[in-house]
Image (cartoon, rainbow, N blue to C red):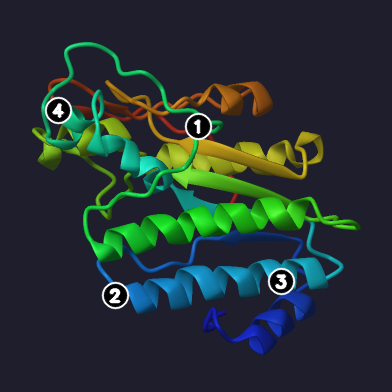
């Protein structure tokens, strides 16, 4: 189906008529768009999706595509500033956890708006998950850098991208693990989702604790190599 994320009536009909129980919400515009467009699609559209999920009796879980950019404000200061300037770290960086405050980047108005739109989505998911009578689980995935080629070898000197990269294989594996562990998960979770990169700054321990079989496998190494391992079978989504 193709549908405008802002068309609540049509989205509701599609979800209702097809008895959809799990929504994987990845629709968004990037930080290259205008502030107004980011707010319209990423904020208003996300609220519409979440509202429909709560209103539809069949929906059990929403997997929300958030972003690692919810904490990109940390990269305006050391020890992360050097990485943002594409300077290779001399030692492992302190991990940013899901319990650390979100800080948007102030690089430019559109980047800031994009960061804030993803923070808004997480806050809304947290709010909805805790309302009385809510039966929908909201799982927020802070996705790392994902590109159209599933490769970072062209970014050999870009340490900020290499440290933040997420392979297709790891993204699919993570969603598989969420689906497999649906019954065990609480009403609300936030997870960082990245590959096993050198100088990865995101703490993913909670995903290994909650989703016992999840282990990121794509690698972005110090020499710029990207190594792929044979993927396990993944569920369609």
Q: 10 Å neighbourhood of mark 3: few (<14), some, or many (≥20)?
A: some
Q: Secondary structure at mark 1?
A: loop
Picture layout, residue 78 above or below residue 105: above
Seen at 76% across and 61% down, the residue is: 21
Q: How many marks?
A: 4
Cα separation between marks 1 and 4: 29 Å
Percent from the top left, x then y, of residue 162? 23, 33
Quadrant of residue 234 within the rendered picture:
top right
C-beta proximity under 8 Å, tags 1 and 2? no
Closer to viewer: mark 1 or mark 2: 1
Cα separation between marks 1 and 3: 27 Å
Compared across the picture, whether 28 is left or right of 139 comes to left
Picture layout, residue 163 above or below residue 53: above
N-term-proximal mark, 4 vs 3: 3
Seen at 23% across and 42% down, the residue is: 151
Closer to viewer: mark 1 or mark 3: 1
Q: Secondary structure at mark 4?
A: loop
Residue 224 disc label: 4
**For mark 2, what is the residue?**
34
**For mark 3, what is the residue?**
51
């Amino acid at each position: 189906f193709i549908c405008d994320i802002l068309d609540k009536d049509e989205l509701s009909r599609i979800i209702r008529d097809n008895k959809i129980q799990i929504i994987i919400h990845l629709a968004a515009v990037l930080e290259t768009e205008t502030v107004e467009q980011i707010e319209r699609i990423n904020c208003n559209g996300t609220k519409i999706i979440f509202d429909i999920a709560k209103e539809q009796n069949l929906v059990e879980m929403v997997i929300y595509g958030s972003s690692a950019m919810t904490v990109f404000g940390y990269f305006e200061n050391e020890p992360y500033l050097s990485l943002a300037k594409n300077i290779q770290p001399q030692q492992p960086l302190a991990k940013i956890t899901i319990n650390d405050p979100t800080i948007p980047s102030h690089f430019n108005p559109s980047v800031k708006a994009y960061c804030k739109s993803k923070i808004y989505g997480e806050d809304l998911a947290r709010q909805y998950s805790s309302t009385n009578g809510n039966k929908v689980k909201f799982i927020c995935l802070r996705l790392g850098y994902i590109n159209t080629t599933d490769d970072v070898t062209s970014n050999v000197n870009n340490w900020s991208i290499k440290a933040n990269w997420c392979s297709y294989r790891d993204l699919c594996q993570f969603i598989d693990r969420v689906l497999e562990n649906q019954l065990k998960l609480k009403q609300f979770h936030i997870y960082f989702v990245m590959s096993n990169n050198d100088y990865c700054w995101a703490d993913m321990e909670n995903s290994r604790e909650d989703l016992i079989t999840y282990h990121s496998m794509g690698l972005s190494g110090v020499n710029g190599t990207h190594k792929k391992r044979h993927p396990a079978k993944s569920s369609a989504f």
